[in-house]
Amino acid sequence: MKKSIWIFQTGEPLPFENKYRGMRLSNLYNKAKKMGEDVLVISTNFNHTEKKFREENNSFLPFILKKDIVLIKSIGYKKNISLLRILDHTILALNLFLFLILSKKYFNKPAISFIGFPPIEWAFVAAVWSKFNKVKTIIDIKDLWPEIFYENKKF
């Protein structure tokens, strides 16, 4: 299955989640589809806004394959500023790495990868994979996570 653009993005609503206002991910996905591009969204199975999992899945694979989306599994978290969130992001990045190793079985490599940062672990894995596979890459810096820890006086 050929996908010319892979969008690596976490922390935002998916283009298929109609109950939220579209953000970068949805806007980029919809624009690319209108241009006739094949797009694969790679995101987390954990919904950052609602703090719950998008889909239950008991398979041993660290990801869930759908038509235009891959949901990478993680452990989830309750508080935005917490050690559990850091652990979640670490597991998410490891599972993304496993998906990317196995992705040749499911998809051809893309022409372009669009990588949302943060989380830094996620962006690092996606960027290294893209460079190793000679995929043109755009990194979108969304906010200052985890630098926000330094600015948060309560932490």
Image (cartoon, rainbow, N blue to C red):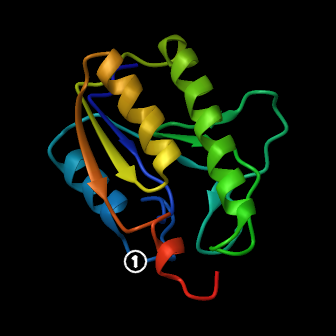
In the rendered image, is residue 42 in sight?
Answer: no
Q: Nearer the viewer, residue 149 or 129?
A: 149
Q: Residue furthest right?
A: 58
Q: What is the residue that sits farthest to the bottom in this orientation? A: 154
Say few, some or many: other residues with alpha carbon within 10 Å of mark 1 (under 14 / 14 to 19 / 20 or more).
few
Residue at coordinates 54% horizontally, 72% vertically from top-left? 149
* Residue 107 rendering spot, x and y as whole percentages: 44, 19
User: Eyeballing the image, is 86 above or below 59?
Assistant: below
Give the residue furthest to the top.
105
- Number of marks present in the image shown: 1
Where is residue 2, by image quadrant?
top left
Please provide percent x and percent y for residue 110. 30, 24
Residue drawn at x 57%, y 34% is 96
Q: Is residue 60 left or right of residue 143?
A: right
Q: Residue at x 40, y 77 (%)?
A: 21
Compare residues 54 and 140 and report the one nearer the observer. 140
Identify the image quadrant of the N terminus.
top left
Under mark 1, the amino acid is: Arg
> Please, what secondary structure does the residue beneath circle 1 have?
loop
Can you see residue 128?
yes
